[in-house]
Image (cartoon, rainbow, N blue to C red):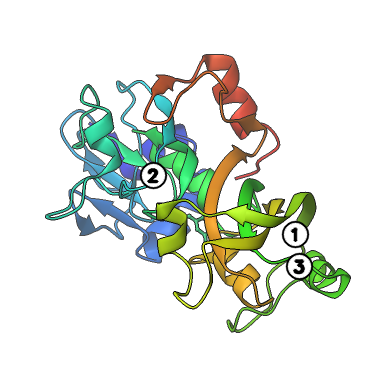
């Protein structure tokens, strides 16, 4: 048995005094119940300790993280009564302990991390960390200088505060882009099958709901394909075909969290 505050600080959640504050604020649960008593003795082998809803690894657990090349059409969830989830692509990975880090929309593709490490997830998704996420997007129309400036300075997408500045590069524009059936379905039916379109790379430093789509929508462009290509310092492995996954190496795990403060 070990004191809850020692367990949390050993697991890297914070210093002893920080984790006591977290407990007092009700951010820590033991087996699903909020635990403000940081001196409580816990059996780390039997109990599930969570910080901000993310499981904190027991000392005996190994931290594992997979990189999945998510295809469009799969939900980022451990289970769903109707839709196929990303776990249906990963039959060897158990949904009791593993979960996706952050979200990609059902119709989005690309880099997704799946882990059993609540602290890793917290580090990568906490709004305070500003971890960069890079996407390639295919959008209707051509972006004007004014629209590029709006994206780069911080687009207002109707939240309380505008988005943080993004890095944006137009990779290609096509005056006659032939939409696939899937792409066609994401656009207003008033548009023809062949449209003017742009392929754009964008890096954002937050993770607001549908953020990239809303940023382009606010600038009068519809996103009809969205693929995440990098998170932090790690890029999607080009050898992973859509639906394939592999475990991150120790070096990659270190790379992923390098430079991210608690
Ligand atoms: N932004 C979006 O709009 N969708 C995603 O899936 C990811 C970022």
Which residue is at a point 57% across and 23% down the rendered structure image?
Answer: 238
* Tag 3 near tag 1, CB within 8 Å: yes
Q: Give the CA separation, mark 3 to mark 2.
A: 43 Å
- Is 165 above or below relative to 240? below
Q: Is 260 positioned to the left or the right of 147 in the image?
A: left
Q: Nearer the viewer, mark 3 or mark 2?
A: 3
Determine the CA span between mark 3 and mark 1: 6 Å
Return the disc, 2 or 1, that comes first in the chain's sequence: 2
Rendered image: mark on residue 151: 3
Residue 215: x and y, percent? 64, 70
Percent from the top left, x then y, of residue 142?
75, 65
Instruction: Name the residue located 39 percent from the left edge and 46 percent from the top edge.
Output: 72
Quadrant of res 37: bottom left
User: Helix, strand, or loop for circle 2?
Assistant: helix
Earlier-in-chain disc, 3 versus 2 = 2
The answer to whether residue 20 is above or below residue 161 is above
Of callouts 3 and 1, which one flags the residue occurring earlier in the amino acid sequence?
3
Residue ID for mark 2 = 5
Circle 1 residue: 166
Near-viewer residue (192 or 4): 192
């Amino acid at each position: 048995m070990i004191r809850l505050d020692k367990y949390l600080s050993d697991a890297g959640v914070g210093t002893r005094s920080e984790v006591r504050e977290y407990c007092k604020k009700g951010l820590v649960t033991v087996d699903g119940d909020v635990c403000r008593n940081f001196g409580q003795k816990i059996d780390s082998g039997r109990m599930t300790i969570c910080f901000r809803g993310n499981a904190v690894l027991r000392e005996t657990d190994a931290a594992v993280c997979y990189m999945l090349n998510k295809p469009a059409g799969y939900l980022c969830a451990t289970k769903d009564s109707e839709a196929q989830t990303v776990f249906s692509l990963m039959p060897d990975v158990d949904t009791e302990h593993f979960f996706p880090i952050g979200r990609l929309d059902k119709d989005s593709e690309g880099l997704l991390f799946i882990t059993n490490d609540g602290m890793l997830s917290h580090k990568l998704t906490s709004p305070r960390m500003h971890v960069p996420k890079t996407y390639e997007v295919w959008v209707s129309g051509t972006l004007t200088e004014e629209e590029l400036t709006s994206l780069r300075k911080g687009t207002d997408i109707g939240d309380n505060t505008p988005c943080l500045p993004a890095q944006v590069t137009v990779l290609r524009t096509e005056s006659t882009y032939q939409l696939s059936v899937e792409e066609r379905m994401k656009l207003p039916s008033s548009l023809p099958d062949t449209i003017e379109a742009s392929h754009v790379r964008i890096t954002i430093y937050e993770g607001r709901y549908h953020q990239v789509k809303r940023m382009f929508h606010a600038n009068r462009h519809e996103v009809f394909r969205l693929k995440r290509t990098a998170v932090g310092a790690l890029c999607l492995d080009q050898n992973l075909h859509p639906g394939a996954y592999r475990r991150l190496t120790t070096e990659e795990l270190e790379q992923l969290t390098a430079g991210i403060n608690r």
